[in-house]
Amino acid sequence: MTRFIADLHVHSKYSRATSKEMELDTIARWGRLKGIKLVATGDFTHPLYFAEIKAKLEPAAAGIYRLKQGEQETLFILVTEVSNIFTQNKQTNRRTHTLIFAPNIEVAEKINTALGRLGKLGSDGRPIFGFPAKDLVKIVLDISHECLLVPAHAWTPWFSVFGANSGFDSLTECFEEQAKNISAIETGLSSDPEMNWRLSSLDAITLISNSDAHSPSKLGREANALACALEYKEIARVIKEKDPAGLLFTVEFFPEEGKYHYDGHRMCNVLYTPEESKAHNDICPVCNRQLTVGVMHRVEELADRPVGFVPPRAIPTIHLIPLEEIIAEALEQGTNTKGVQQEYMRMVEQGGSEMAILIDMPSEEIKKIASPKVYEGIMLVRQGKLKIVPGYDGVYGQISIFPKEGEAEKPPEGKEQMSLF
């Protein structure tokens, strides 16, 4: 079965803080550049965007769509994200985000009709509801048992199933009788599968990774490598069953770069490891307010295994840095500068796609299309030899690929790359 890359969580221009370029045509074009065969539509609950989906897409296979006109190499699957803010077990301000996969446009329309009775779908691409997450599962599966529901970015502090500020300690605590219908979670940018492997309660759960892209260039910063029939039922089966023959590996952000990896206070410029936070009773030493507790801290609280534990049936991972960022650091320019963009487009044209260059291309072939400095950067990323200042309290982490003068090359702790190259 031919391998393909799937990014199953993106947003449209109708979501808050999202680029106006996040339209189906632009997403399809960037999907081809990135080497992503299958992309989520995103935001199908939004009335205006759903009208565009129905007008612009046509079936390519069962439950899979493509543009009627324009770039048809990139395929689409119907996925949206919704927010639930609710009270459960006498605790207020429970906040979860959930991905909903729909098997076809007809089912998506029925979901929109049902949810439209319970909230304002047109207010945002990611609508907000006041009922519990477990009720969302029942509502959607009562419409079609072929739907798939996946807790999104499961560890972020504010809006996730395991969030330090609003979440739960287990899937069962959150979804109660509906937990049996949750077979996967999205690990999110600030967490990777290796961190999730430390929880034995997640051994039967499939860990998927997606970009949650709010702009076209962010597509594929996390993704999934699949080898199955390109049709909805088979993709859903692979995820539900955690099939290692179908889900080959996940493409990961270095989680330290995620904006909620460590603890801290952005306004006070305080960045702490979980151990440092505990020593300060999770209180900011500058303003004496509660620190924003990050993903690593939260994992430490719930983990029952040591760092480095690999459970049975673990799906392999590969950690990457986007090609634009490698080029930008090599050229010592910003990612959006003309020089970086021109070099990116040239390399992608010659190499086939970004994923082909970063994952599949032999090093000798990369040498033929990359400058020596960019080639060196790609090799350092493949080896995991990076310097990272972890993200915290909404601030993205900072990655340095090339060591500064007098600075030793040193891989981040626990991030030796797996042998996929």
Image (cartoon, rainbow, N blue to C red):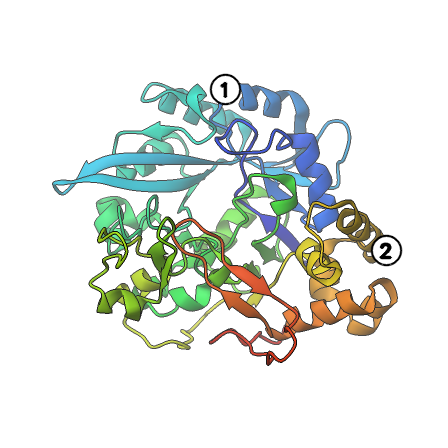
Q: Quadrant of residue 89?
A: top left
Q: Is residue 302 above or below residue 189?
A: below
**Crowding at label 1, few (<14), some or many (≥20) Cα neighbours within 10 Å?**
many
Q: Residue at x 70, y 56 (%)?
A: 328
Q: Quadrant of residue 379?
A: bottom right
Q: Nearer the viewer, residue 128 or 5?
A: 128
> Could you say where residue 129 lies in the image, as x and y percent from the top left?
31, 29
> Residue 182, can we see it?
yes
> Could you say where residue 320 lies in the image, as x and y percent from the top left?
61, 63
Residue 350: mark in rendering:
2
**Crowding at label 2, few (<14), some or many (≥20) Cα neighbours within 10 Å?**
few
> Could you say where residue 12 lies in the image, as x and y percent from the top left?
56, 32
> Distance from label 2 to label 1 (Cα)?
40 Å
Q: Amino acid at mark 1?
A: Pro
Give the position of the C terminus as an image quadrant. Answer: bottom right
Q: Residue at x 34, y 59 (%)?
A: 263
Q: Which residue is mark 1?
A: 47
158 sits to left or right of 314: left
Give the number of the mark in front: 2 or 1.
2
